[in-house]
Image (cartoon, helix red, strand yellow):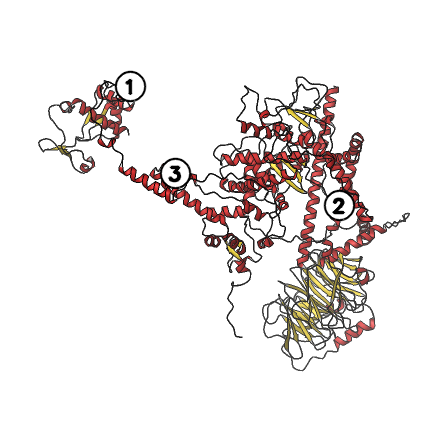
Amino acid sequence: MGGLEKKKYERGSATNYITRNKARKKLQLSLADFRRLCILKGVYPHEPKHKKKVNKGSTAARTFYLLKDIKFLLHEPIINKFRDYKVFVRKLRKAYGKSEWNTVERLKDNKPSYKLDHIVKERYPTFIDALRDLDDVLSMCFLFATFPRTGKCHVQTIQLCRRLTVEFLNYVIASRCLRKVFLSIKGIYYQAEVMGQLITWITPYAFAHDHPTDVDYRVMATFTEFYTTLLGFVNFRLYQSLNLHYPPKIEGQAEVELKPKEGEAYALNSESYMEKLSALSASLARVVAPNLEDEVEIDEFPVDGESAEHEEARRKEQESLEKQKKLFEGLRFFLNREVPREPLAFIIRCFGGEVSWDKSVCIGATYDVTDPTITHQIVDRPNLEKQVISRYYLQPQWVFDSVNAKMCLPVADYFPGVLLPPHLSPFVTEKDGDYIPPEKLKLLALQRGENPESAFSGNTASLPFTEEEEEEEEEEEGGEEDDDGSEEEDDSEKEEEEKLKRMEEQKTQGKKLPVKVTVGTVRLEDKQRRVQEEQNEEKRLAIMMMKKKEKYLYQKIMFGKKRKVREANKLAEKRKAHDATLKLEKKKTKKARRE
Amino acid sequence: MFASAFSRARDQALAVQGFSSAPVQAPARDIRNTVGNIPMEWYQDFPHVGYDLEGKRIYKPIRSLDELDKFLDKMENPDYWRTVRDKMTGADVKLTDEQVELVQRLQRGQFGDVRFNPYEPAVDFFSHEVMIHPVTNRPADKRSFIPSLIEKEKVSKMVHAIKMGWIQPRKPKEDVPSFYDLWAQEDPNSVLGRHKMHVPAPKLRLPGHEESYNPPPEYLLSEEERLAWEQQEPAERKLNFVPQRFGCLRAVPAYTRFIHERFERCLDLYLCPRQRKMRVNVDPEDLIPKLPKPRDLQPFPTSQALVYRGHGSLVRCLSVSPSGQWLVSGSDDGTVRFWEVCTARCMKTLPVGGAVKSVAWNPNPAVCLVAVCAEQAVLLVNPCLGDKLLYGATDQLLDAYVPPEEERLQPVQWVAATAEEHARGIRLVVQHGKAVKQVTWHGKGDYFASVLPDNGHMQVLIHQASKRWSQSPFRKSKGQVQCVLFHPTRPFFLVATQRFVRVYNLLKQELTKKLTANCKWVSSLAIHPRGDNVICGSYDSKLTWFDMDLSTKPYKVLRHHRKALRAVAFHKHYPLFASGSDDGTVIVCHGMVYNDLLQNPLLVPVKVLKGHALTQDLGVLDVAFHPTQPWLFSAGADATVRLYT
């Protein structure tokens, strides 16, 4: 046994990881700079598989970075910029201290700046990668765009965020790629399908923010710095893909025309243009005029068997998608001043509708309330003073629900002042065994093309039945899962046993034997049931023989399944109770009315 | 603050009035202090406060006022409020009206002098208006006529630097578009090496129905759920918000935690260690081992056939006669009952006066004898059942005992039964000094062993019935003996202590094997009729199967029961074994032992038998197989014995 002694923690996973402090020292950066670098470069800690080994035998809580990542950061040109900036700040402070204003001026002129282009390219080598990661980007930018222009971060950042998000919204309108919208209590969720990638983002409701104190705005600002760069490049590329001008131009109008009429001093020229754009009411100018015959039609390929079905499904989906894109085509909307203008205008425009609002609400209104061609007016007040017969007055939820249902829903439920039907999340796809709210069932029936009235009545009739069925299934499942099976015994068997017991007792303990012959009944044996029982027992016995590890896993899985069923049951029960109380109340009011 | 204002006022007053009017209380004597502007604390410990103009000490005035006097003074003296202490002389000075007014003016931030006007019109000397007379009449400097040398030097330096190209004009700001087509030449293969280890951040969960501003009513939290939600730790909550319902969109407020949530997401993105986790995506059905079907492993007891009722208390033990016709059971009610197996009829009841812990039927078919543990004695009982010849022969065999010439020293006393006892069937009484826990026969039917719950070495005794002779085989105790067993084919003796099963060779008188039971407390022991496999039940609800040829560690540990195991048993002919437990069930398993040494025993649970009711948290206390049929007897705490066929 010769050779050198092998030392511990000098090979293997211990050498692949580095703690944060060591990494920081290696990069010679302060913690704040290191954090900034990590955020910009997208470097994050890794959880080692064997933490103790990596931690050199210690079990202290440490965060580990991959050594490769840190080595890769070593060559980052931005680090030098960070250092330059530090020097710049020092010089500036000194100049201020000495009141050398010329120097201050000069230094400020030569303020070191850096660009993040190469980092974007490096983090997202392909455009699709960038699109995939756009969820957080959009949510963050939409949030920053709503910040007040005071204090929390640079005004330029806020303005840039606003510009970029408006550009993105305009792109979504132009490409009509919005798919789902959802009014949540947190904000409004949107989902768009951009080049085959589903992008979901959330925007806050348009209220002033209650700025929390326990949030580090520097971290968020650093993220936003990167996100704005990324979103700018993505926007450019997206506009290019649609042959649109970037920066966007509004179609059909020269810039001169956009200026407000004389005497109506609205804003600075540059600002008013931006405002017009963000009104989302005008289409964008294209570099090349769109050719209507240019629509790409998918060629029909001769297909066979299995793939034919697939193809058929795909085509159907495509058709429904096309239909959805033209959902509001030909409809003219008018938004009352109390409804949130921007989201509604955005959604309506995304599906081909025309939209306008009161001139005093926002720039960019295209027609007036009195326009007789308006088909729908979105209102959010319980009572209206004067109504025009030729249009529907609807609550804003109708627009959202119609988009999610991919069809214009019956308007009756959404009249002003009416108790609205629940607003369901379009992001939930129920698997079998999950709880489906009855409204969703109704909606599905509607989508299948069933008559809403009959579907409705049929639904109420069939609902309890389906629920019962579900419960029965659940019960059965429960029985199967029950591995102790103490309650397993069948009713018939139990009865029999009971009878036997009674007879025994009578035989052994009863003094007088009441001898009596009764007419025998033919006992029907349920074969299926017996087979089922046998199988259940077999399973139970087999579970007993499982290894400890597998048993643990099995029980965990089963626990999860059971919990799911339990939750679904709970929801169903709650709904039932709610419906019952509602019915009761209705009856009471009816009675009261009659009296 | 106030005091300082007063002292300031006093000084001012002195200044205003001049020194002449300073002594207010004693105008006759000038008692001005000459110590100067020093901290008066220095004179704290002296009887005087300084020196007057003549160099004499100024003594502190005598102050004999206590708090009460002070208070009275405060209440009664109308000038109390304007009386201040002169620090320099220690005397009380009453401020005059002028002085008081001065103090008040100063407090208001006004000038002390009433006549002072702070707003006198300003005279602008240096104004834009050109006057005929200069303000100053100074002639202009010479340096204002000749150019500055220093400036010239500076300029020439700059000119030189510009000539040499050291100073360059500022570069005009490059006006490149900030955004361009970054992915114009995108190369999907240009993925960096580090991206191999890249773990993309998981996307945020999409909202469900409960997050809607107008969710279906079932998603709203009830009052209890809401309370539970509030009491949970924020990290433990399933939802990080309370579902709410708003009648219309107009009523929806801003979400207060919106910025928090974005910030938390940011933190997750750059701070949270990422790890690739393999999701367990197994069908739970695949985890269930594929075992031979119980149907193929028949025969085994499947259902309850008979119940033997009669005992008044829990039935501790039972034993089946080697012919399989009779069953004996012992109970806590102090009786031993003999039953006919097929009819469940109690043939005989034998009161023994004490709880019966153990009964054992002599395995020799030629002998009709039952060993019964009754308190401190082991009774050898001839039940007088079955063939008359047989039990007659047994009596003859017992009577044929000839006591040896010299009495040997024995750990126990062998006493022949009295006539009354004899009539009841008891033939011999082996009197132990202590209560006997267990009795078990050797396969031949001559020897039997008894276990006493003791700490010494006399825990196990081996008796020979024909010679009425007992001995203690061990010299030392190895722990509390739980049960003992004779090996069916070889001269081995198995002793189970709490955690180990020791196998002794009785011929060589040595320890051959020590089996580690891997459990906390062994309760019962059974040995396969071939003699190579042992099962061992424990109070921590485990059943361990030992293959003695294989290892001293258990071949398999079965955790089938949910409560402590009380008894285990092997069938004599069929590959079956059973275990009875406190949870009231008996589990019958198929335990096939193959002749081929390479093949491991096959253990398959085949039936869970229920029937015994739980009484006092006890279920099944003993199990035994029928010697020839695949039948199983179980004795339960509900005072019954049950037969499963």
Q: Chain of mark 1?
A: B
Q: Which mark is residue A376?
A: none
SS type, badge 2: helix
First of labels 2, 3 by sequence position: 3
SS type, badge 1: loop
**Which amino acid is tagged 1?**
Glu
- Identify which residue, B24 or A457, lies in the foreground: A457
**Which amino acid is tagged 3?**
Val
SS type, badge 3: helix
Quadrant position of the N terminus of chain B in the picture = top left
- Residue under circle 3? A104
Few, some or many C-alpha atoms within 10 Å of disc 2 (few <14, some 14-19, many ≥20)? Answer: few
- Residue under circle 2? A475
* Percent coordinates x, y for residue A292 in the rendering: 73, 34
- Identify which residue, B7 or B626, lies in the foreground: B7
Q: In the drawing, does residue B582 fall left or right of residue A160? A: right
Instruction: Classify A211 as above or below A26.
Output: above
- Residue under circle 1? B129
